[in-house]
Amino acid sequence: MDVKKSADPVDRAVAAVRGAQDRLVRLLHSKDDAVRRKAVVALQDQDPLPISPVADALFRARDADSRLRLVALLGAMGAFEPIRVLAEFATALKGEKDMRVRRSILNTMVVVGMATVDASGALSAGDGLTTHPEMIREEDDRHAREPGGLGGGT
């Protein structure tokens, strides 16, 4: 059934939303910088974020500058939907040949990933994860003194 000819108002509304998102994504390729910036803001204001349409545009974009802009936009969306954005970046990275775009994707993946770790508190103080050599040595010494610890104390 053709959605445009559907009598169901919900089907027509969903099709209109998807069409509007697709048009906004196409405007990201405009030669007019003001139009591109306004399209970025409009896409970022969507709820839920149109990650899939933007990622699809990244996969289809022919020129590196357009792909770099799309990477930046997806990176900004990563603050709100990090898992979805990281998954799209992983897919994009597999097919990307341009080293500037690959580097941009990788750098943005690190930024999105670290922001997610920071927001979750996964590496907060007192969680038992230590990386400083002196702290590791102190922790090993403490475990060695504990009954049944690494040092074999009783």
Image: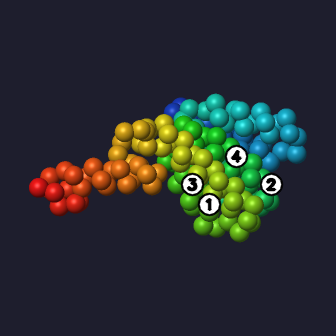
Q: Which amino acid does label 1 sit on?
A: Ala
User: How many marks do you count on the picture?
Assistant: 4
Query: Is the residue under label 4 in contact with that under label 2 (CB below 8 Å)?
Result: no
Say whether residue 28 is visible: yes
Query: Is the residue under label 3 in contact with that under label 4 (CB below 8 Å)?
Result: no
Foreground residue, 12 or 42? 42
Task: Using the numbered discs, state the Cα–Cα distance from disc 2 to disc 1 in whole angstroms.
Answer: 15 Å
Query: Is the residue under label 1 in contact with that under label 2 (CB below 8 Å)?
Result: no
Residue 92: image x %, image y %? 62, 60
Label 4 SS: helix
Q: Which amino acid does label 2 sit on?
A: Asp
Whichever of labels 2 and 4 marks the residue nearer the N terminus, that label is: 2
Which residue matches tag 1? Answer: 92
Whichever of labels 2 and 1 marks the residue nearer the N terminus, that label is: 2
For label 1, the crowd category at 10 Å Cα-Cα, with few meaning under 14, some 14 to 19 and many 20 or more, is many
Task: Using the numbered discs, state the Cα–Cα distance from disc 2 to disc 3 in whole angstroms.
Answer: 18 Å
Foreground residue, 46 or 21? 46
For label 3, the crowd category at 10 Å Cα-Cα, with few meaning under 14, some 14 to 19 and many 20 or more, is some
Which residue matches tag 2? Answer: 65
Query: Is the residue under label 3 in contact with that under label 1 (CB below 8 Å)?
Result: yes
Which residue matches tag 4? Answer: 72
Residue 83: image x %, image y %? 49, 48
Whichever of labels 4 and 1 marks the residue nearer the N terminus, that label is: 4
Q: What residue type is labelled 3?
A: Glu
Foreground residue, 92 or 3? 92
Look at discs 4 and 1 and give the one toward the viewer: 4
Determine the residue located farthest toward the right in the rendered image.
32
| Residue at the image position 80 percent from the left and 59 percent from the top | 63
Task: Using the numbered discs, state the Cα–Cα distance from disc 4 to disc 3 in whole angstroms.
Answer: 13 Å
Whichever of labels 4 and 3 marks the residue nearer the N terminus, that label is: 4
Which quadrant of the figure has residue 5?
top right
Which residue matches tag 3? Answer: 88
